[in-house]
Amino acid sequence: RKEVEQDPGPFNVPEGATVAFNCTYSNSASQSFFWYRQDCRKEPKLLMSVYSSGNEDGRFTAQLNRASQYISLLIRDSKLSDSATYLCVVTSSGNTPLVFGKGTRLSVIA
Amino acid sequence: SAVISQKPSRDICQRGTSLTIQCQVDSQVTMMFWYRQQPGQSLTLIATANQGSEATYESGFVIDKFPISRPNLTFSTLTVSNMSPEDSSIYLCSVNREPYGYTFGSGTRLTVV
């Protein structure tokens, strides 16, 4: 079983739609959780950290369920510029390497 | 975010040759991480590079194939040795530095022919 598993995608949605990505992780010792965004031919960039209480940043909402080892990302009112691959990422402590899911590709269509 | 300068940005190499990738960080960091991203895949950790000690390699990666140097706290190199077409990938370095968190170099796109 892979350490971090994500919806395979791709997700093709119209502008303005709401889309949700799910992710599960296998290492119960994981301490930090992130969603990264990767545009085509670019390096991953941090979209947001994920906290147990859930957190929101504009149109983006992230949730973490430690008991189920489950992470989600909700994007509301999708924009064309949201088209990218979204990577679910975990790490076990402050300065250990990140472990990446395979990513979910999102295409927002006009 | 932490500034990481990675080069080269891309290269096309003949099989059997070696390529050295460099990453320079704008401040001192304890660890630097090297990842590989094969076409259509996510990032896989190759090794963790500490200054003053040998790099720690992940399963499936060995020092003879991917030697790493870490001469100081702001710089590291990864060499891809005796290349074959299967080594064609994007290679990325990464650091974790407060308050920016984990950031990445812009990547090296390697094609082996």
Image: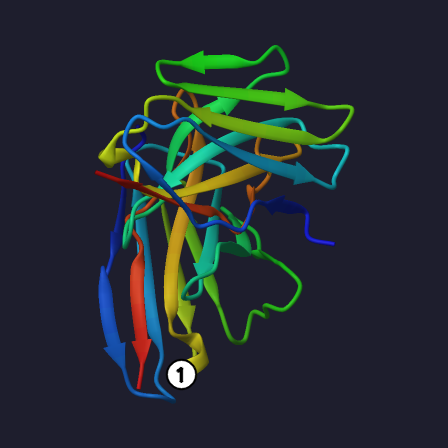
Q: Residue at x 45, y 60 (%)?
A: B36
Q: Position of residue A66 (x, y in %)?
A: 73, 24
Viewer-proximal residue, B108 or B26?
Answer: B108
Q: Quadrant of residue B56?
A: bottom right
Amino acid type, mark 1: Pro
**A81, above or below B109, in the image:** above
Q: Position of residue A83 (x, y in %)?
A: 30, 41
Q: Residue at x 66, y 27 (%)?
A: A31
Residue lying farthest to the top in this orientation: A53
Say which element carries label 1.
helix
- Quadrant containing the C terminus of chain B is bottom left
Q: Position of residue A104 (x, y in %)?
A: 47, 46
Viewer-proximal residue, A66 or B45?
Answer: A66
Crowding at dot 1, Cα within 10 Å, few <14 / some 14-19 / many 20+, comes out as some
Viewer-proximal residue, A102 or B83?
Answer: A102
- The residue that disc 1 covers is B85
**A17, above or below B83, in the image:** above
Viewer-proximal residue, B12 or B68?
Answer: B12
Horizontal arrangement in the rendering, residue B26 relative to residue A19 (left or right): left
- Quadrant containing the N terminus of chain B is top left
Q: Quadrant of residue B94?
A: top left
Q: Position of residue B79 (x, y in %)?
A: 40, 69
**A2, above or below B25, in the image:** below
**A97, above or below B11, in the image:** above
Q: Residue at x 39, y 29 (%)?
A: A47
Horizontal arrangement in the rendering, residue B82 relative to residue A90 (left or right): left
